[in-house]
Image (spheres, helix red, strand yellow):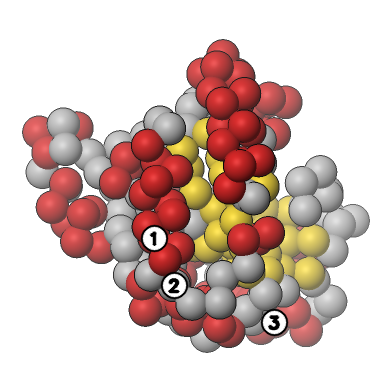
């Protein structure tokens, strides 16, 4: 839940290349060092919060992710895992924060478009999204850039079963406070009409867009 003090585990590596990716150090140009599961668990123990958010990149690509989530749960953690839901793994979690990518994410004009076809072929896997919905307590989160994105979301939801619309959250696309605020009002109005929730990018409001936040 927004505002809950949480420890973040950010894995590096992603099978998508969203044009507006706000963590390119985990996707377009992955960085970081290998950490053992033991080292991660020890580090987590040093924080007072029991809420752990596992994000990326795409955390389901990380070797040992099933073991890590299982052991975290056994240690008493409340686990949220954030995924684009292009692949499925039997992780242990209290909340699956599922963020299927809309067509606004495809990098047709970035890097001479060389990742566009790969991204486009992977970004939406209905069977996997459905499996997350059917398996876990979930929320569905969409990054919206333009008003027409709401039409795309409605079409997408029409291809899924048993979606609780109260669990659909909309986030503005933007990397600065100015960009986010410019979109917030019309997105909120569209959310009210559709029955979706609006979620701000609190970390950008508080800290700006920088690694470690
Ligand atoms: S899925 Fe997430 S980490 Fe991967 S490219 Fe898209 S925004 Fe970046």
Q: Secondary structure at mark 3?
A: helix
User: Residue drawn 40% across and 41% down?
Assistant: 149
Q: State yes or no: Cβ of the residue under disc 2 lies below 8 Å from any atom of ligand 1.
A: no
Q: Are marks 1 and 3 in contact (CB under 8 Å)?
A: no
Q: Label 1, label 3: how many angstroms apart (C-alpha)?
A: 34 Å
Residue 77 visible to an observer of this rendering: yes
Nearer to me, 16 or 133? 133
Report x, y in % for residue 183: 54, 23
Mark closest to the chain's N terminus, 3 or 2: 3
- Residue at mark 1: 156
Report x, y in % for residue 168: 60, 56
- Residue at mark 3: 71
Q: Label 3, label 2: how many angstroms apart (C-alpha)?
A: 32 Å
For label 1, count other residues whose C-alpha is less than 10 Å away and answer few (under 14), some (14-19) or many (20+): some
- Residue at mark 2: 160
User: Residue drawn 9% across and 33% down?
Assistant: 112
How many labels sit on residues?
Answer: 3
Pick out the residue farthest to the front: 193
Q: Secondary structure at mark 2?
A: loop
Report x, y in % for residue 185: 62, 23
User: Image quadrant of residue 69?
Assistant: bottom right
Q: Label 1, label 2: how many angstroms apart (C-alpha)?
A: 7 Å
User: Residue drawn 63% across and 33% down?
Assistant: 188
Q: Are marks 3 and 2 in contact (CB under 8 Å)?
A: no
Q: Are marks 1 and 2 in contact (CB under 8 Å)?
A: yes
């Amino acid at each position: 839940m927004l505002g809950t003090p949480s420890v973040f585990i950010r894995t590096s590596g992603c099978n998508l290349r969203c044009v507006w990716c706000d963590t390119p150090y985990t996707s377009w140009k992955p960085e970081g060092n290998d950490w053992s599961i033991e080292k991660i668990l020890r580090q987590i123990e040093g924080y007072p919060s029991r809420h752990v958010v596992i994000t990326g990149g795409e955390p389901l690509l990380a070797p040992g992710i099933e073991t890590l989530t299982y052991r975290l749960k056994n240690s008493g953690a409340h686990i949220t895992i954030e995924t684009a839901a292009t692949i499925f793994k039997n992780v242990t979690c209290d909340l699956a924060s599922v963020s299927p990518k809309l067509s606004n994410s495809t990098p047709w004009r970035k890097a001479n478009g060389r990742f566009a076809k790969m991204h486009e072929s992977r970004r939406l896997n209905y069977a996997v999204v459905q499996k997350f919905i059917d398996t876990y307590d979930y929320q569905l989160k969409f990054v919206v850039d333009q008003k027409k994105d709401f039409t795309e979301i409605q079409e997408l939801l029409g291809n899924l079963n048993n979606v609780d619309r109260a669990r659909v959250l909309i986030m503005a696309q933007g990397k600065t406070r100015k960009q986010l605020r410019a979109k917030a009002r019309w997105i909120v109005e569209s959310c009210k009409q559709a029955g979706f929730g609006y979620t701000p990018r609190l970390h950008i409001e508080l800290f700006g867009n920088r690694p470690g936040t």
